[in-house]
Amino acid sequence: MAAKKRSWLGKRIVRFGKKARFRLGRLLAAQSTVPNSPVLDLALFPSLVPLEAHWQEIRAEFDRIYAEPEKLPSFHEISPDQKRISKGGHWKAFVLYGFGERSERNCGVCPKTAALLAGIPHLQSAWFSIIGPHYHIPAHSGVTKGILRAHLGLKVPTDAERCSMRVDKEKIVWREGRCVVFDDSYDHEVSNDTDETRAILLLDFDRPMRPLGRAAHRFSIWALKQSPYFRDAKRNMIAWEDRFEANYHAWETAARS
């Protein structure tokens, strides 16, 4: 009887969460000072322009990180709730910021990238996202309309048209050194149908909104940070930082010898 009661309560909580998320999304969309469209014009976000201007410096730091890809964590090893869309070792991640918190050690390994990220207002997350050949990330959507997402192309397959992302009904094809901005609360999926790896700098930042929207969004982010979803991801990120730091120092020593 107790188990049935817990199951019933759990289902009610999930249903309530979905309804609350839908209502919050409508409020945030109404409060937005930029269009509520799947893909947005980069000109609306001047703070992202320096990323394009210095993309080769970011790429150089990425290349050092990616020297031994097998030692980087898969996305679901950082965020276990992503197991549905992250399988095996096909989707790798190197986290610089998570939920507004800067990873001092990882940023220390990528100082130029970190300096550029510091100039982006209301940054929530930033990480190198690496997808292997012939991998498909199934359709999914982000947790809140209060956050927008940008991708900076760093390593794009030669046949770029066969490595793309669908956001709602729009198609995005990455270009090295170019940024794209989209609303990941829309249904989206990624397909890499090439023999090459695709790597981007992924970053999340707060959607520009009027005061009521900003207040509601801040509260929702605070609530998310109290959840096991956030605590588990943070704990996993720290554990991988420990491993990477030890490996990175070993690489640097070997390179100098």
Image (cartoon, helix red, strand yellow):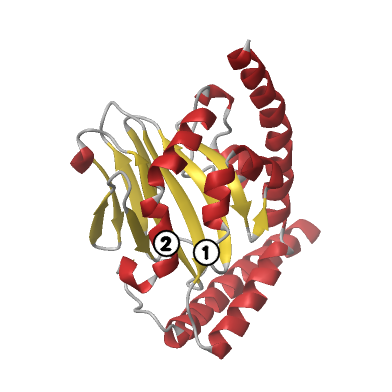
CB-based contact (under 8 Å), mark 2 and mark 1: yes
Q: Which mark is residue 24?
A: none
Seen in the image, is 178 located left or right of residue 244?
A: left
Question: Which of the 4 image quarters holds residue 13?
Answer: bottom right
Q: Which residue is the extreme one toward the top?
A: 257
Residue 139 % position (x, y): 37, 52
Does any portion of residue 215 appear in the rendered image? yes
Residue at x 74% of width, y 45% of height: 235
* Placement of 20 over or under 186, stated as above or below: below
Does any portion of residue 38 appear in the rendered image? no
Distance Cα–Cα, label 2 vs label 1: 7 Å
Number of dots carrying numbers = 2
* Placement of 67 over or under 242, stated as above or below: above
Seen in the image, is 52 located left or right of residue 115?
A: left
* Placement of 172 over or under 120, stated as above or below: above
Q: Earlier in the sequence, mark 2 or mark 1?
A: 2
Q: Which mark is residue 120?
A: 1
Q: Describe the element under mark 2 as helix, strand or loop.
A: helix
Residue flagged by tag 2: what amino acid is it?
A: Leu
Residue flagged by tag 1: what amino acid is it?
A: Ile
* Placement of 222 over or under 68, stated as above or below: below
Q: Describe the element under mark 1 as helix, strand or loop.
A: loop
Residue at x 58% of width, y 62% of height: 124
Residue 12 % position (x, y): 64, 71
Q: Which residue is mark 2?
A: 48
Crowding around mark 1 (Cα neighbors within 10 Å: few <14, some 14 to 19, many 20+) is: some
Quarter occupied by the N terminus: bottom right
Q: Which residue is the extreme one toward the right?
A: 2
Residue 150 % position (x, y): 41, 58
